[in-house]
């Protein structure tokens, strides 16, 4: 397994092997353990080599004691030492806010503070791991994998190069450098106005910042401003795309074609995109001819309908429907 063709930082080009794709576990330790154990069983049988965790491994809506997000990530980091390139964790929209020190909210639910506190002494290790994650995986049989799906990002100027070579740290550094001492107080006041709480309170309660002396004190401010960076504006739709539900079936088809074409550059033609991110009645949805949406736990309705995808990456797949026979369950035998 190695990168061929383009040297894109955020695109992994696989060459051979059997891949197992699991997505959106959202802090569900029982599901995580089932998939991890299934992978090692398949591996022992020579039926799986590469484990692809397709993002959103963290943030449970369940009570805190049932949310094993940090435990899962730490376990993945350990597994990565053993499996190396054969373990691929693709960045999801739920990991993203922890790279930038921003919040993520759905309705009244604020997802990020619990994880910010739970990271504790492991913070640096976890955040730098998230920072390193790829966005896309492509295979010689024409199956690409990413968390959310196709987005408008690639239509932007140099969108492909900018997204596929994305650097979070460049954005954060240039944003931090832009904040002058003179400007800082008014920015802090603007944040207070925006959220209706003092900056100090938000930094403490949402990001586990100890106080004014904490070197991370300004991180929420920097992250918030970073969201207006022109590169960040490319990242957001890529990570949060609601696909056909957002763009409509026809427009989404165009975005999907563009995505698959971009991923085909200097590589075998990419025909099918496998994603997670969105609820699926049962464990999967054939979105259209070229996209298969998989739900392994959280987004499967019900959870036990969750599935993983197991396929030989050299086998040619032309349509999403062709992949459906390769879906399997760890909940039902
Ligand atoms: Mn998700």
Image (spheres, grey):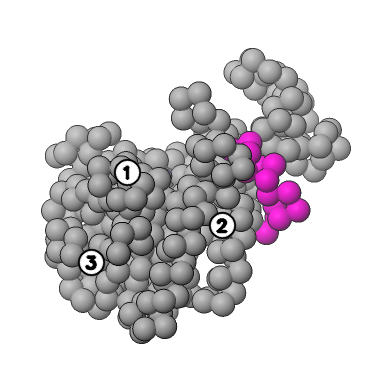
Q: Which residues are drawn in magenta? A: 112-125
Answer whether labels 2 and 3 touch (C-beta < 8 Å).
no
Of the four image quadrants, the one with ligand 1 is top left
Above or below 46: residue 172: above
Q: Which residue is mark 2?
A: 72
Q: Where residue 59 sits: x, y (%)?
A: 53, 43
Q: CA distance from mark 2 to mark 3?
A: 25 Å
Residue 124 lies in the magenta stretch: yes
Q: Which label sits in the foreground, 1 or 3?
A: 1
Q: Residues within 10 Å of mark 3 (few under 14, many from 20)?
A: some
Answer whether labels 1 and 2 touch (C-beta < 8 Å).
no
Q: Which residue is more in the foreground, 90 or 252?
A: 90
Q: Residues within 10 Å of mark 1 (few under 14, many from 20)?
A: some
Q: Quadrant of residue 318?
A: bottom left
In the picture, which quadrant includes the C terminus? bottom left
Label 3 sits on a secondary structure element that is helix
270 relative to 125 in the view: left or right: left
Q: Where residue 22 sits: x, y (%)?
A: 38, 60
Residue 175 lies in the magenta stretch: no
Q: Is residue 257 visible?
A: no
Above or below 211: residue 24: below
Q: Where residue 143 sits: x, y (%)?
A: 26, 65
- Disc 1 under 8 Å from ligand 1? The reply is no
Q: Where residue 321 sits: x, y (%)?
A: 14, 58
The numbered dot on residue 326 is 3
Q: Which residue is more in the foreground, 177 or 307?
A: 307
Q: CA distance from mark 1 to mark 3?
A: 20 Å
- Disc 2 under 8 Å from ligand 1? The reply is no
Q: Which residue is mark 1?
A: 302
């Amino acid at each position: 397994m190695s990168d061929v063709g383009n040297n894109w930082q955020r695109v992994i080009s696989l060459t051979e092997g059997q891949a197992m794709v699991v997505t959106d576990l959202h802090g569900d330790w029982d599901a995580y353990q089932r998939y991890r154990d299934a992978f090692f069983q398949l591996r022992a049988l020579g039926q799986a080599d590469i484990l692809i965790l397709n993002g959103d491994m963290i943030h449970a809506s369940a009570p805190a004691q049932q949310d094993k997000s940090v435990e899962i990530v730490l376990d993945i980091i350990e597994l990565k030492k053993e499996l190396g390139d054969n373990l691929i964790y693709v960045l999801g929209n739920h990991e993203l806010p922890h790279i930038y020190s921003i919040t993520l909210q759905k309705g009244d639910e604020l997802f990020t503070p619990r994880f910010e506190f739970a990271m504790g002494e492991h913070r640096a290790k976890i955040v730098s791991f998230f920072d390193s994650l790829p966005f896309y995986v492509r295979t010689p049989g024409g199956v690409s994998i990413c968390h959310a799906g196709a987005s408008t990002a690639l239509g932007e100027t140099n969108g492909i190069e900018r997204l596929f070579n994305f650097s979070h740290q460049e954005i954060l550094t240039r944003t931090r450098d832009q904040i002058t001492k003179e400007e800082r107080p008014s920015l802090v006041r603007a944040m207070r106005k925006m959220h209706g709480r003092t900056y100090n309170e938000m930094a403490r309660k949402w990001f586990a910042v100890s106080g004014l002396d904490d070197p991370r004190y300004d991180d929420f401010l920097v992250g918030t401003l970073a969201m207006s960076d022109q590169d960040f504006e490319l990242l957001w739709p890529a990570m949060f795309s609601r696909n056909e539900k957002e763009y409509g079936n026809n427009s989404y088809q165009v975005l999907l074609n563009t995505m698959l074409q971009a991923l085909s550059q200097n590589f075998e033609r990419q025909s099918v995109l496998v994603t997670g991110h969105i609820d699926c009645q049962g464990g999967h949805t054939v979105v259209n001819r070229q996209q298969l949406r998989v739900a392994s736990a959280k987004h499967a309705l019900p959870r036990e309908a969750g599935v993983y995808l197991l396929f030989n990456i050299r086998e040619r797949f032309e349509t999403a429907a062709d992949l459906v026979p390769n879906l399997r369950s760890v909940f039902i035998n």
